[in-house]
Amino acid sequence: MFYPNLLKAAIVRAELTQGEFAKRIGISHNALTSRMNGTTKFTIDEVDRAKSVLSINNSDICEIFFADEFPKSGKNERSIAK
């Protein structure tokens, strides 16, 4: 699941407007709006560029873009070795 409010907060922390952010990741402001409202999904390349532009780490990327797709550390994890 994508959390647009977390992305908006990261954009603000980077002292960018949404238009500037869109341009830096290589999409139009209209395309960003479409992604923010869930009409279109971000591509992996866009997510990778967002990580660089916003100077955020993998954990932040996962929280913003993929939070419900991966189990939290220590929860619902199965040990391979027994």
Image (tube, rainbow, N blue to C red):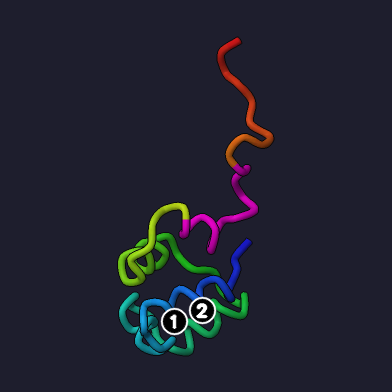
Residue sitting nearer the eye, 5 or 36: 5
Amino acid on which the number 2 mark rests in the picture: Lys
Residue 22: say if magenta: no
Which residue: 51% across, 55% down?
A: 62
Which residue: 57% across, 18% down?
A: 80
Q: Is residue 72 left or right of residue 27?
A: right
> SS class of the residue under badge 1?
helix
Amino acid on which the number 1 mark rests in the picture: Val
User: Can you name the residue that lies furthest to the right here?
Assistant: 76
Label 2 neighbourhood size at 10 Å, few (<14), some (14-19), many (20+)?
some
Measuring from the top left, give residue 13's x and y in whole percent: 41, 77
Write the start and end of the magenta stretch as one range: 60-72
In the image, residue 20 sits, relative to residue 71, either above or below, namely: below
Which residue has dot 1 on it? Answer: 12
Which residue has dot 2 on it? Answer: 8
In the image, residue 66 sits, relative to residue 36, either above or below, namely: above
Q: Are marks 1 and 2 in contact (CB under 8 Å)?
A: yes
